[in-house]
Every structure is written in C-alpha cells, then in structure tokens.
Amino acid sequence: MKSLLAVAITLLIALQATSQPLQRVMPEQVGMSTQQLRYADQAIQKAIDSKQIPGAVLAVVRQGKMAYLKAYGNKQTVPTAEPMTVNTVFDMASCTKPIATAISAMILIEQGKLRLSDKVSLYVPSFTDNIRVIDLFTHTSGLPAYAPISSIKAKHAAPNPSPSPIVEYIATCKRDTTPETAFKYSCLNYITLQQIIETISGKSLRDFAKENIYDVLGMDHTDYNPTGKLLELCAPTERLKDGSVLKGIVHDPLAREMNGGISGNAGIFSCADDLAILSAALLNGGEYNGKRILSPMGVQALTHVPASLASFGRSLGWDVSSPYSSNKGDLFGPNAYGHTGYTGTSIVIDPDTQTAVILLTNRVHPEDKGEVTRLRTMVANVVAASIYPPARKYTDHYYQRTLQFENENPITDGDIVMLGDSMTENGGDWGTLLNAKHVRNRGIIGDDAMGVYDRLYQILPGKPKTIYLMLGVNDVSHNLSADSVVTLLTTVIDRIQSESPKTKLYLQSLIPINESFGRYKTMIGKTNLIPEINQKFELVAAQKKIQYINLYPFFTEKGTNVLRKELTTDGLHLTKEGYDIWSKQLR
C-alpha cells in the first residue's frame, strides 16, 4: 500500500510540474486589436522577403494570456529548408542574462545569501578592486565588453585550472572605467555573476536556474546545451568556416569555447511558450499558475533602475532606457523593460499595460548578416498600438471559432467560403454537402452582421474564389427592423466587394422559422418578418449585381411562411434533410 501511495505522489508531482502553456485567446478578449497586430505580420514578412531573417516566431502576452502566437518563414535554410513552427527552440544569446543569471542572483538575494552592495572579491578573491554586485547587474563595473579567447586559451593551457581561465582573466584584466561612472555593456559582468551564483549555491548555473526557475514554472523547453527532442526543435544559427552549422550549440564564442555552453552571458535555449510563461510570472509579481519564483518586491527590484544609477538606464538584468533599449519601441511607457540577444531574439515586458512582446528570430542563419534592430522597434510599436478596447464584444464561442480560424491555413483564391451564423456552422463539412473541394466553413453560432464584418480580415486578404453569404437571423432576434437588418447586411456586402472585387459573391435568403417549438423567445412574432427581409435582400442583390439564391420556398409549409417541422430540430436550425435541400440548391 505504501509503495502504491508513493507512486501516486510521484505521479502527482510529475503532473504538477508538466508545462501548462498560457491560455490562448483572441486579442479582442484582452483588449487588443487583431487587425492592428496584422501590421506585425507584414513587418516580419518584409524582413523575411528582404533576407534579413530566415523566419521568426512572435508571441504577445496580455493579462496573463497568450493573445497572439505566430510562426513565419523558415527555421533553417541550409542544408535544407525547414518551416518555422511556434514551438521552435531558439538560442537566446544575451537574453540569458536576465532570464537565467539575473533571476538566479535575485533568488539568492531573497534567500539572504547575497547583497547588491557586496564586493565581488567576497566571492571571487582574485578581484582586488571595488566592483560590487550591483555594478555587474547594471553594466557599470567598468569591465571591458568582451574577452580575447585565443590569448586566454594560450595563457591557461593546464587542464581544469581553478579558478577558470575566463574568471581569472576578468578578475585581473584592465578596467575601462572606474565602477559606477559609466555604462558599458559587458558579457564579463554576467560571467562573473555566474561565478558568484555557483560559489554561493554550490551548483552550476544550469542546475540552479533549472531547479529554481524553469522546473518551478513548467518551462520544459528551456535549458542549456539542449539534447534529444529539445535539440530537434532548435533553430540553427551560423554556418562555420568548416561548413558545419551550429544547432543546439550556443553561438556566443565565450559561452561556447570558455564555459562549455553553460554561461552567465549566453547559452540558454528556449521557445515562445516558455518565455510567455516567464513573462506572465514577472507581470504577476513573480508567480504563475500558483508557482512562485520571486516575491513581488524581488520583481520590483529586478525590473527598475536603481536610484543611484538612474542616468545609465539599466535595471538589475533588464534594459529600461539605455542606448540598447530600442527593442521597446516608441510607444510603451517608461516602466517597460526588455533585453535582446545577438542571434536575433528579443523580449519586451510592460507592467503598465500587462503586456509582453516576444520576438524570436535566428538572424545569424546561415550567415551573420541579418539585421533585426529596426524590426524589433516596429513590432513593439505595432503591439503597443493594438492595445485598445474593441468596438464590439462577442461571445466566448465567437472568439473560440475565430481563434480556430487563425490556426487554420489562410483563405486562398481557390477557396469557396460558406459565411454566416449557426445555420452555416452547423452544416459542418460543406465540402461533402456540396461535393466540392476547397470549401471552408466560416459560420459562427450566434453571429450577426457586425460580427461577420469584424472578422472579414480573416477572409478577404486571401481573395477567395466564392463566398456564399447567409446572414440576418440573429439581427432579427435583436429586434431590429427589416430595414435595419438590410442596412447592416449591405455594409458587409460593400466591404467584400471593395476588398475582394473578383470574389464571386452569392447572397442567400433567410430560411423560415417555426415558432410552435417555443424554443427562441426572441423570435416570437417574427415569422412574417423573414419574407419581408428576403424581398429586400433580393433588391439589394440586384443593386449590387450579385446573384441571389432564394432558399425560402423550399422550406415552408405549403401556403404559409412557417418552416416545415420535419426539417428543423428546434424551430430554427435544420435537420440533415434540411441541409440536403439547402446544398442541392447550391450545387
């Protein structure tokens, strides 16, 4: 019995540790505009077309939910092309500094094992000057930007020297400035922080970050030196002189050649979903899904510029307003913070709007010639500008369906689109009903004219071959007059004809209702309104020079305006026989 209990407990712990990605929602559900975010798609695609990057993944987090997640282009182009996917794992390069090293050091501060004011020499005795821990965090130590790898290797030829050659070099190298007199971005600061973390914890930075950050939050696609399935998901970076292409091996030379891939300045590999979880935790005071990595005060300290160093613009691991902060864009406020990675990665987090922008590219593939500085700014601007309440709000089902459409292949000029409300959605596989290929069901239960209008951006850019439009019954249920229903429908038709003029548009009549079922109280007394609306629809079709399909007479009881009972399940929606009659008229 005890062994069974132990197994159950182990299984429960394993299930709790399993990654739980952020809930996917439509941008409108968290106060953002999908149509505005499309400008980010355009900017990224332009960068791909101009060969600045082979591909990208964009994730936008708002209010603890994933509001936008898309993959673009290819994750590799040599030796063969492979398409980018949203679960691609990237070499995060210098984003390692905040998401591994800085958070790990802050955890030690919260545990009472480290102080910002401590001299580095307390933990690395070969340091003999007054550089403090806070100076490493904020790049105000005066250490040079990088280190000469070949000369360090030549000087330290002995196996397994202690301290490590790179730490020994950092401790004794010439300083560019005295501490806290200037900002100079330096990878050496974070390699030194790594040494401090490992000295205090007795663990490698890899193990410490995994145990205290990634395992806690369920970030199971984040690690140093990826292997197995994680390695398979990796986007390659640069092609080396010998023709080999780095994949799952850190691009940064210091991290790769001096620290075996596990380094405080670079080396972490991660994906959009994991980084979204981390961003959500930071936006939620250090906690996600009931799991905490930092206290709210720790997050506050980590992400705000220390008062004594305000002029330099760097917080404890993140960039707030230094010359390197252009990835924040021009619109996010003064409390936004972020970081970039040399390989083409970028994270921006804005606590004021509860938003994070994660843009992942491998711009150094296959050659270190890509450029993403401008792209980062433009994407951040697009995301910031998308934050405003939608003009209209819809049902959860509406957003679930539009999110489903977002994840499907885009509409193309060879597609037939069935567009409408529950009558259309409930038809299911319209390709089978019509005995035709490339038929897309874009019906949404409960949708009305403006709901369709607000989602045409998912349809019209593809310039579909044909659209069959049936719309208006839900507008009728809102107690609108016949003229009002027709006006709204005309607005939809006008937009379709304006944005996709070559699309063959068919306007279908409304189908009669049967009030005797008593199911829909909002449709009581509306039986005779349906044929009145249909007459007006036919006039609109003539005016707009589109074909009108009058389905109405095929569904009425003889001599009445009432829907035949055998063709409906509830007085409004159709049986299989009803759909057979409908589809026959379209064929």
Image (cartoon, rainbow, N blue to C red):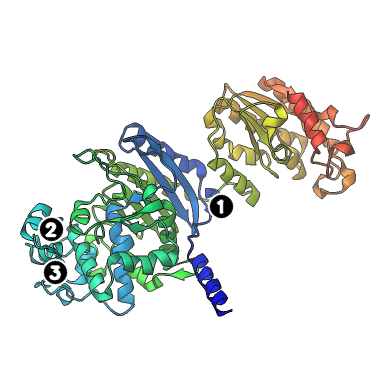
- Local SS, label 2: loop
- Looking at the image, is mark 3 or mark 2 nearer the viewer? 3
Q: Foreground mark, 3 or 1?
A: 3
Of the two numbered discs 3 and 1 on the same chain, state the one appearing first in sequence: 1
Pick whichever of labels 1 and 2 is earlier in the sequence: 1
Marked residue nearer the N-terminal end (3 or 2): 2
Element type at mark 3: loop
- Pointers 3 and 1 in contact (C-beta within 8 Å): no
Q: Which residue is mark 3?
A: 162
Mark 1, other Cα within 10 Å: few <14 / some 14–19 / many ≥20: some
**Residue placed farthest to the right in the image?**
559
Local crowd at mark 3 within 10 Å, few (<14), some, or many (≥20)? few
Rendered image quadrant of residue 156: bottom left
The label number, if any, that marks residue 144 in the structure image: 2
Say which amino acid is labelled 3.
Ser
Three-letter amino acid code at disc 2? Answer: Pro
* Amino acid type, mark 1: Gln
